[in-house]
């Protein structure tokens, strides 16, 4: 029961991350394409196709996780996306290009790239793997279609898990904002030191 609850909490949390990121990239589509170009990994003719594929996979992954439809497959795809983002971050960090925007958007925010974001992605990948390995019927539309009781699938336990996932999403968002503020404060202090010397 504990592992099932953890899997559902991770599933809903990840759904919020992927859907909010998809909504953000749709809202700022040209900026999103520009960020992908800035990474200088893909040939320019491929950038737009990659952006469409990436955007589509984010939405499909998020909605699938939220509704509990083929959650294991969605978690695997989500883990693959996060791995790809981490590799792109690492390549540019090793090139010394730290001024780039991560392009995450949504709940994950937009930050200058850093190794901290790579670690964050690895943590989110671990959550994806939890969803992949632990099948839970709570909040699963497929379970309802399969004939399971609606009151069990969307009962009190599910709403407690969903509320916990929302609380974690809020804390995650606050942490991201604090990370941005800390980085800006460090930049301001560094400028002040340069000016005073």
Image (cartoon, rainbow, N blue to C red):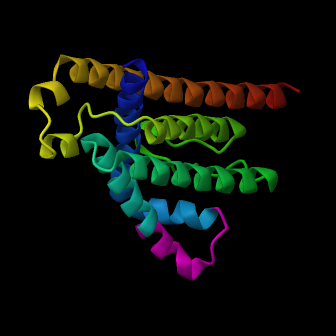
> Residue 78 vs residue 59: left or right?
right
| Residue 54 on image: x %, y % | 45, 62
Q: Against 92, is 52 above or below?
A: below
Q: Against 136, is 28 above or below?
A: below
> Residue 190 vs residue 104: left or right?
right
Residue ID at (66%, 56%): 88
Residue 21 visible within the image = no
| Residue 134 on image: x %, y % | 43, 34
Q: Quadrant of residue 187?
A: top right
Residue 112 is inside the magenta segment: no
Q: Nearer the viewer, residue 92 or 151?
A: 151
Residue ID at (33%, 50%): 70
| Residue 176 on image: x %, y % | 52, 29
Q: Nearer the viewer, residue 91 or 35?
A: 91
Q: Nearer the viewer, residue 178 or 82?
A: 82
Q: Residue furthest right?
A: 197
Q: Against 182, is 76 above or below?
A: below
> Residue 151 vs residue 95: left or right?
left
Q: Residue furthest bottom?
A: 45
Residue ID at (59%, 78%): 44
Residue 117 visible within the image = yes
| Residue 110 on image: x %, y % | 51, 43
Quarter of the image where the N terminus is located:
top left
- Total count of labels: 0
Residue ID at (19%, 43%): 141
For the record, the magenta segment spans 39-52
Residue 46 is inside the magenta segment: yes
Q: Nearer the viewer, residue 138 or 24?
A: 138
> Residue 148 vs residue 187: left or right?
left
Judged by its main secondary structure, the magenta piece is: helix
Quarter of the image where the C terminus is located:
top right
């Amino acid at each position: 029961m504990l592992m099932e609850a953890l899997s559902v909490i991770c599933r809903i949390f990840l759904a919020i991350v992927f859907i909010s990121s998809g909504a953000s990239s749709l809202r700022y589509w040209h900026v999103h394409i520009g960020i992908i170009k800035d990474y200088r990994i893909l040939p320019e003719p491929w950038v737009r196709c990659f952006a469409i594929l990436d955007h589509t996979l984010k939405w499909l992954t998020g909605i699938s996780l939220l509704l509990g439809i083929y959650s294991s497959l969605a978690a695997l795809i989500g883990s693959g996306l996060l791995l790809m983002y981490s590799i792109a971050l690492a390549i540019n960090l090793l090139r010394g290009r730290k001024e780039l925007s991560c392009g995450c958007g949504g709940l994950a925010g937009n930050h200058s790239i850093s190794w901290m974001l790579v670690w964050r992605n690895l943590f989110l990948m671990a959550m994806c793997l939890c969803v992949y390995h632990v099948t839970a019927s709570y909040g699963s539309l497929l379970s309802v279609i399969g004939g399971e009781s609606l009151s069990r699938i969307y009962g009190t336990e599910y709403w407690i898990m969903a509320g916990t996932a929302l609380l974690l999403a809020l804390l995650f968002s606050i942490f991201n904002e604090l990370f941005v503020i800390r980085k800006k404060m460090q930049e301001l202090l560094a400028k002040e030191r340069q000016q005073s010397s």
